[in-house]
Image: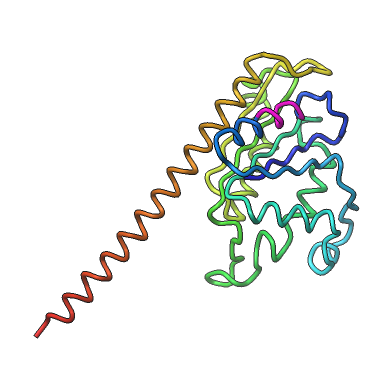
Amino acid sequence: MTIVDGHPDPAREHLNHALADRYAAAAGEAGHVVRRIDVGELDFPLLRVPSDFYERTPPPAIERAQDDLRRADHIVFFFPLWDGDMPAVLKGFIEQTFRPGFALEYGAGPLGLPKRLLTGKSARIVVTMGMPAMFYRTVFRAHAVKAFEAMLRFNGVSPVRVTLLGNVLPNARADGSCRMKRMDALARRDGRLRSGRGLLRRLARVSVLAGACYATIRLLRSP
């Protein structure tokens, strides 16, 4: 499991950091290996021309982040809503990270479509905002979160679940509120869902193997 803390300010008093900390602690207590990417602490340039995206080697900070994301079966993104979207630093991180060769292999899929390289991973997007979450969903149509969710799915990540935390006051701090307790519940739930998917995949492989064995036996016994 890899947590991407997308708040651009590394100062630890922000609520997003506390939410990510609480989720990570609960996931660790449940027995999961948790890796952490704090975007506000990374040093990387913004992409400015297509050749930087398609041809250049990612900077070291991005390569390390890509390795953490590759090793994860579940990815959790935390970020505050700024001007209706994710902060610019997080957007720059996403553009740098989800490159050809990491997220997609162009022309390698059926009919020349991109091959999805992140298949098998799931994700959760946790967004804090000052407005009520229902207002963001109904009036703004949650357009930025939906676009991000669609991008992850296009790269093979599925399922992608979204948690919107509204009515967050400026300079909100961590406390014993229901938001913190909700992170505990989400971490436990996501862990159970991943375990369930792993069991289903194992059962599917056993079923395929059993079917192949049965077919082989029938073939050997046929006159």
Q: Position of residue 23 (x, y in %)?
A: 64, 31
Left/right of residue 89 with respect to residue 205 in the rendered view: right
Left/right of residue 27 with respect to residue 14 in the rendered view: left
Q: Where is residue 125 in the image (x, y as percent from the top left)?
A: 64, 36
Indicate how the structure is coloured in the image: rainbow
- What secondary structure is the stretch in magenta mostly built from? helix
Using the rendered view, name the quadrant where residue 111 is placed. bottom right
Q: How many labels does the image show?
A: 0
Q: Position of residue 37 (x, y in %)?
A: 76, 44
Left/right of residue 68 with respect to residue 191 in the rendered view: right
* In the rendered image, the vertical position of residue 150 relative to residue 214, given as above or below: above
* In the rendered image, the vertical position of residue 151 relative to residue 207, given as above or below: above
Q: Position of residue 103 (x, y in %)?
A: 66, 59
Using the rendered view, name the quadrant where residue 186 is placed. top right
Of 109 and 58, which appears nearest the observer? 58
In this view, the residue farthest toward the left is 223
Residue 19 within the segment the image draws in magenta: yes
Of 109 and 163, which appears nearest the observer? 163
Give the residue displayed 75% in from the left and 19% down from the top.
174
In this picture, which residue range is highlighted in magenta? 17-22
Left/right of residue 54 with respect to residue 205 in the rendered view: right
Quadrant for the C terminus, please.
Answer: bottom left
Quadrant for the N terminus, please.
Answer: top right
Give the residue displayed 75% in from the left and 28% down from the top.
16
Using the rendered view, name the quadrant where residue 62 is placed. bottom right
In this view, the residue farthest toward the bottom is 223
Of 99 and 39, which appears nearest the observer? 39
Residue 120 within the segment the image draws in magenta: no
Give the residue displayed 61% in from the left and 36% down from the top.
28
